Image: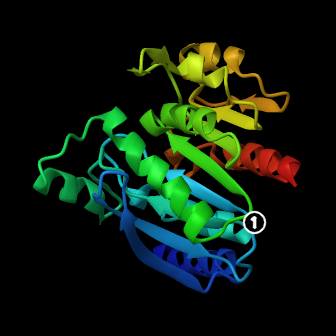
Amino acid sequence: MKQLITIISLLIAAAQTFGQPNVKTVTFPSTDGLTITADLYMTTDTNAPFIILFHQARYSRGEYLEIAPKLNALGYNCLAVDQRSGDRVNGVVNQTHKKAEEAGKKTKYTDALPDMEASLSYVVNVLKAKKAIIWGSSYSSALVFVLAANHPDEVTAVLSFSPGEYFTIDNKSIPDYAAGVKCPVFITSAKNERKYWQPVYDKLQSTDKDFFLPQSEGYHGSKALWENHKGNGEYWEAVKAFLKGLN
C-alpha cells in the first residue's frame, strides 16, 4: 500500500510540473556584495509573471520545493531565494546565510532586506520580468511590505504569510510601511494569528486587498501550503483566487 501511495504521489508531482522543464540554481550579488543563492523555476513562457519567494526564519529556499512547481503549473515563473537570515529546511542548506556567516556579516531578520531588494532588482532588471509579485513567509512576510512601499513601480502584488509587527526599520513600523502599499495584497496565517497582522491589513491603502483564515487551526508561514499539512487545500484555493484576480 505504501509503495502504491508513493507511485501515485510521484505521478501527481510529474503532472504538476509538466511544462516546467527549467529549474536551476542561480547566484547574484546582494546590495552589499554578498552572493545570494536562489532557485529559478521557469515555465515555458519567459514572459509569464514572476513570483519572488522569500522564506521564514531559520529556513532556506527549500521552503518552496513543492510550492514553486505548483505555481509554475498555474503559469508563474518563480525565484525562491536564500536570504542571509535563515538556516535550512527540507534538506536544503541556506547558502546565502552560510556565506554571510563566513564573511562575518550580521544575519538578523532586518539584515535580509538588502537580499530581498537585490532579488527584486534581479528579476526586474536581469530576468526582465514584466510583472514581479513578491511573496513572504513569517519575518519576510513583514519585510515584503517594506519592499513594496519602497518600490511601488516594480512590485505588482504582495502575498504575505503570517506577517506581524516583528520590528521597525528607520523608525517606521510595518503598519507604517503598509500605509504606503497601493498594489493588490493578500494576507493569510494560522487562525490564531490574525491579531498580529490586523494592524498591517487596516493600514493598507490598496483598493484590492484580501485575507484568508482557515477553518482548521492552520499553520504559520508558507508551509501552510505543504501537502502534509492539514487544510493545505483551502489555503491553495485562496491563493489561486487572489492570483486569478490579478490577470
Determine the residue located farthest toward the bottom in the rendered image: 21
Locate residue 197, reporting x and y percent.
58, 20
Locate residue 21, reporting x and y percent.
61, 86
Amino acid type shown at disc 1: Leu
**Considering only vertical position in the picture, is 48 above or below 109?**
below
**Considering only vertical position in the picture, is 27 above or below 247?**
below
**Is 38 left, or right, of 237 in this rendering?**
left
Q: Which residue is mark 1?
A: 74
User: Residue placed at 59% from the left, 64% from the top?
Assistant: 125
* Crowding near the residue tagged with mark 1, few <14, some 14–19, many ≥20 C-alpha atoms within 10 Å: some
Locate residue 72, reporting x and y percent.
67, 69
**Considering only vertical position in the picture, is 164 above or below 226?**
above
**Count of numbered marks:** 1
Q: How is the image coloured?
A: rainbow
- Tell me if residue 219 can be seen: no
Give whichever of 148, 246 is nearer the camera: 148
Give whichever of 196, 104 is nearer the camera: 104
Q: Report helix, strand or loop for mark 1.
A: loop
User: Residue placed at 46% from the left, 79% from the top?
Assistant: 24
User: Residue placed at 87% from the left, 47% from the top?
Assistant: 245
Q: Name the image quarter holding residue 78.
A: bottom right
**Is 159 left, or right, of 190 in this rendering?**
right
Locate residue 121, reporting x and y percent.
53, 57
**Considering only vertical position in the picture, is 18 above or below 177?**
below
From the image, which quarter does the C terminus lie in? Answer: bottom right
Give whichever of 182, 89 is nearer the camera: 182
- Tell me if residue 9 can be seen: yes
